[in-house]
Amino acid sequence: MRRRTQVSDVRVVTWNINSLRARQERVEAWIAEVQPDVLLLQETKLADDAFPGLAFNALGYDSAHYGQGQWNGVAILSKVGIEDVVTNFAGDVEPDPDARIITATCGGVRVSSVYVPNGRSLDDDHYTYKLSWLDRLVTHLGADADPSSDVIVGGDYNIAPDDRDVHDPAKLVGATHVSQAERDRLAALEAWGLVDVFRQQHSDDRVYSWWDYRGGDFHQGRGMRIDLLMCSKSAAERAEWCVVDRNARKGKQPSDHAPVIVDLSD
């Protein structure tokens, strides 16, 4: 893991933890090692009153959580302050029935932790819901943030931005996560002013952030890059280093997702 070069650097991480209750010890150990300033979590799978805010506070983090029990759930942990928290979509955007987005200002950066719907299959109502959710995300940004300021929308997008982000694109023809309509929604976020900061720094790398638990996919390198840090231009210009921490996918009872890390210069 890269050492922090300056105390003033801000390290922002997104991580779909796939049940915080099951992986609390892993998260705390990883935090102690990596020392993120802002950690965006998805799939906490906890109600708000079950979220271990006191445990994170003991590690030096303020936190905000938006949960609904055994499904979904998003959170923001911050060592650099947490202000102006918004749960669900902002403004007059149609609210979502699921706990999939939380937004706050941390250290002068407007951050959102997002858990985009899976979509299931192209002929499923959940796919239509996914596209609608992504449309509402763009509208939310218009109501909540300024693309000329520092903005990061990090999370599990359940979309591989292009074929470099899929181990075997031919096997996914006609499936979700790679459809043109989903990728068009990412393009709409880019049109609003966001940049896929990992791809900005690693134009040719075939690096993944999610691997199915089944079939030994992680050890076989059969994954997808669906966990993204989408940054405004000013935040992307501050990005010194961005990486997927594959080591966090190893060991006993890991999440099926790996954290994605970006260091922003002061």
Image: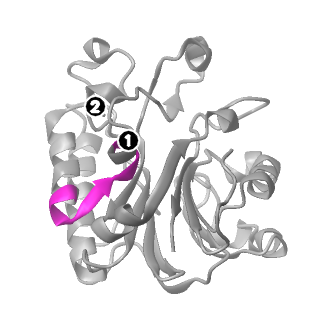
Residue 193 in the magenta stretch? The answer is yes
Q: Residue at x 78, y 46 (%)?
A: 26
Residue 237 picture quarter: bottom left
- In the image, residue 55 sits, relative to residue 168, either above or below, namely below
The circle on residue 242 is none
Q: Which residue lies furthest to the front in this view?
A: 5
* Residue in the image at 34% along x and 29% along y: 204
- Tell whether 163 sits left or right of 49: left
Which residue appears farthest toward the bottom when viewing the image? 84
Q: What residue type is labelled 2?
A: Thr
In whole angstroms, how far apart are the C-alphas of marks 1 and 2?
8 Å
The answer to whether residue 158 is above or below residue 152 is above
Give the answer, above or below, for where 256 lies relative to 110: above
- The residue under the point 40% across, 39% down is 226
Q: What element carries label 1?
A: loop
Q: Is residue 145 left or right of residue 128?
A: right
Q: Is mark 1 in CB contact (under 8 Å) with mark 2?
A: yes
Image quarter for residue 182? Answer: top left
Image coordinates for residue 31, horizontal then vertical, percent: 74, 57
Q: Is residue 18 left or right of residue 105?
A: right
**How many residues crowd around disc 1 within 10 Å: few (fewer than 14), some, or many (20 or more)?**
many
| Mark 2, secondary structure of its residue | loop
**Magenta residue span:** 190-199
Residue at image mark 2? 176
Residue at x-position 62% and y-position 15%:
219
Disc 1 residue type? Asn
In the image, 213 versus 99, the foreground residue is 213
Residue 158's label in the rendered image is 1
Q: Is residue 17 visible?
A: yes
